[in-house]
Image: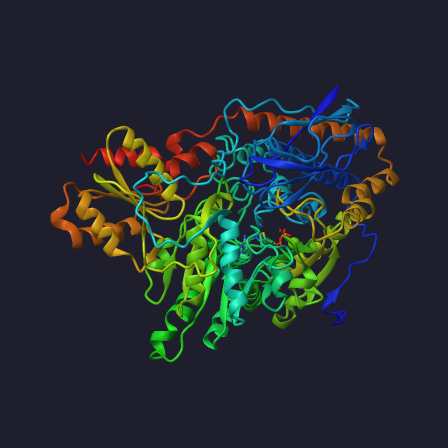
Amino acid sequence: MPIDILMPALSPTMTEGKLAKWLKQPGDEVKSGDVIAEIETDKATMEVEAVDEGKLSEILVPEGTEGVAVNTVIARLAGDGAAAAPAPAPAPVAAAPAPVAAPKAHVPATPQEPVEKDWGPTKPMTVREALREGMSLEMRADKDVFLMGEEVAQYQGAYKISQGMLDEFGPKRVIDTPITEHGFTGLAVGAAMNGLKPIVEFMTFNFAMQAIDHIINSAAKTLYMSGGQMGAQIVFRGPNGAAARVGAQHSQCYASWYAHCPGLKVVAPWSAADAKGLMRAAIRDPNPVIFLENEILYGHTFECPTSDDFILPIGKAKIERAGTDVTIIAFSIMVDTALKAAEALAEQGISAEVINLRTIRPLDIETIAASVKKTSRVVSVEEGWPFAGIGSEIIATVVENCFDWLDAPPVRVAGVDVPMPYAANLEKLALPQPNWVVEAVKKLF
Amino acid sequence: MAASPERSRKPRKNAESMDRDELLAAYGNMLLIRRFEEKAGQLYGMGLIAGFCHLYIGQEAVVVGMQHCIGEGDEVITSYRDHGHMLACGMDPKGVMAELTGRIGGYSKGKGGSMHMFSKEKGFFGGHGIVGAQVSLGTGLGFSNWYRENDRVSLTYFGEGAANQGQVYESFNLANLLKLPVVFVIENNHYAMGTSVERASASRDLSLNGVPWGMPSLSVDGMDVLAVKEAGAEAVAHCRAGKGPFLLEMKTYRYRGHSMSDPAKYRTREEVQRMRAEHDCLDAAKAKLLTLGITEAELKKLDDDVKVRVQEAADFSQTSPEPNPSELYTDVLVEG
Ligand SMILES: Cc1ncc(C[n+]2csc(CCOP(=O)(O)OP(=O)(O)O)c2C)c(N)n1
Ligand SMILES: [Mg+2]
């Protein structure tokens, strides 16, 4: 009986990939464990190992083919019958991982999008490339800047943010560490106290919990405790929040944890321009900056200024979509959710203004207040938990500053108040969806 | 640094730590893990399992040999690379596979996933996603045994990468200070993701990492289930006798990538093939069983039985329904 070889999913967020190379040809004997092909995703090149044994009878997807969807039949084995386990029956329910929206250039939602400073020509760029470019530009300009973390150098970054940087900057400036978050964070803060400008990559912010003592007690408080004599010019960066199906210990938003602490700045980019512009600002800022990235956004493409001078100010929000009836405030990947909700609301005759916070601390109260005074209604959207979340802070700020302008009580949309479940259906129920925002907005009218 | 003999010994070759029947049982357990993991890899490729999924293929002798040293009431705790440990503890392959697919029939009702499963009944305390965390937790399991003055032992497994975490050494200190019954098992599979042990540990002999705290240790061929059993038995006896913790460094190897996505650029294909060809725990146990008079036919029958069990688990993992949406809100706090 012939056995189908399917395009495998090889990472939590993979939905398609390029079939880069066949290492076996029709007629070749294949043993379980043999590498039969190489596939490429935006993150990495990976080897496909055979699970079944037999003779490769045909290749259905030629090498070089891009965009091959997971589960496509890519080749067939003439199985020897007995040894081959039957392919399991298809799942009774749709259990495939929630597909991540295909990377697409973001199209401005409305023509009247307010203009920022014009930085000249742009080009499409992924958030991943933008982060790398932001770091590389600063490292070229300032030899005190260096990058350290787990797998940042030889492996080219666990999420390929630092790809190629070891080659360019060498092992003294792109440094692989053992899995010792508390230790290497302390080391980096010490180096910063002595004038270097470290960029510390956490493989994800979940692991920064092991280092949070140094981030807060050593980095955030030193300037104050030393009466301004010494501080730490340092960036702590890495993916924050939920990826896809990685469970409770790997899916958490830390925005509100860090935003609570004086002595820290907290930045959360959404687009490629945010990523590049804010990365440069974070590295140049004389304070410790927590730089919260998002794994799902890494592969998303946006137009990004190409100017070598391009930089964005920390502490300034951006109106991504102008509107008159309600203000929706979001950061990081929730800006996508907010924009989708605004689109749906427009179809129902409600004009929503969407604010991309970009920086969480210091919060851009000016932009928020100006918008709410115009729309008189406000909804905050975040992936993290509701209790003492960023939404709580936004709403307190709005009430303090715009009480007389409000036509309805402010509303928070947040992740459900439970640890992140693994099951596909439950995970989806736990994270804010555009329709949650639409429903929240409609209650205000 | 040379290992001084009384501090770190290499066990003898050709340990006779199991008789024929026990070795046959151990072989069956290793085979179950191997086939289970192969099937899990397949289901992942089909999109039925998602997220992180760390396979144990290659390392089976470690957990199976150690499990043969402990009994009911003893505790086991490990990292995210946990499927083998659960099967060795006697947890049901169906419940494990259904957790991998995120179904209600899984050990955590679909809410934990590959890295987070537990069984109070079988003494399995997880499945932990933060590298090194289980070492302090496992020390706490040992503490609870010491506190209750029973003779139970905690087996605390961690990778050679985790062995660099600071909390590991805080745990070693506490464990020997209080004489806690903890067997610390370093599963040195040579790599932490893409970082080889040489690139991450200044220590060249991890079995000596307990020396500053006066902890006895052994360095063990973790690809040989008989050697594992022999060393494990000594370590467990030491703990049960109230003499405190024991450190075992198991030299082992993982054949598959770190998780499912692994660019595999940090080691050569030849290195993997050589380990598979020359050091496979199943091959070695099989050869030994044949010399003990077990026939090829008996081994084939065992293999077929294992395949049936694994297929049943795979089927169950696809027919068990997804958790009810109301499960999203359960188990957050103990009610009442
Ligand atoms: C504190 C922490 N840092 C980083 C990670 C990401 N990570 C997961 S597994 C791993 C490698 C661990 O290697 P090792 O301890 O040797 O165990 P193995 O995977 O080889 O079994 C890393 C860096 C994590 N889960 N937790
Ligand atoms: Mg390892």
Residue A107, position in %: x, y?
40, 39
In this view, the residue farthest toward the front is A120
Looking at the image, is B314 positioned above or below residue B87?
above
In-front residue for pair A146/A311: A311
Q: Is residue A439 visible?
A: yes
State the colouring used for the structure image. rainbow
Looking at the image, is A245 positioned above or below residue A306?
above
Residue B288, position in %: x, y?
84, 42
In this view, the residue farthest toward the left is A404
In-front residue for pair B181/A173: A173
Count of residue discs: 0
Q: From the viewer's perspective, is B198 left or right of A228?
A: right
Q: Is residue B145 visible?
A: no
Point 47% across, 70% down: residue: A189
In-front residue for pair A273/B211: A273
Q: From the viewer's perspective, is B213 left or right of A214?
A: right
Residue B270, position in %: x, y?
80, 48
Point 74% across, 57% down: residue: B220
Quarter of the image with the C terminus of chain B in it:
top left
Q: From the viewer's perspective, is A280 left or right of A364?
A: right
Q: From the viewer's perspective, is B178 left or right of A27?
A: left
Residue A227, position in %: x, y?
33, 79
Looking at the image, is A356 positioned above or below residue B219?
above
In-front residue for pair B323/A43: A43
Quarter of the image with the N terminus of chain B in it:
bottom right
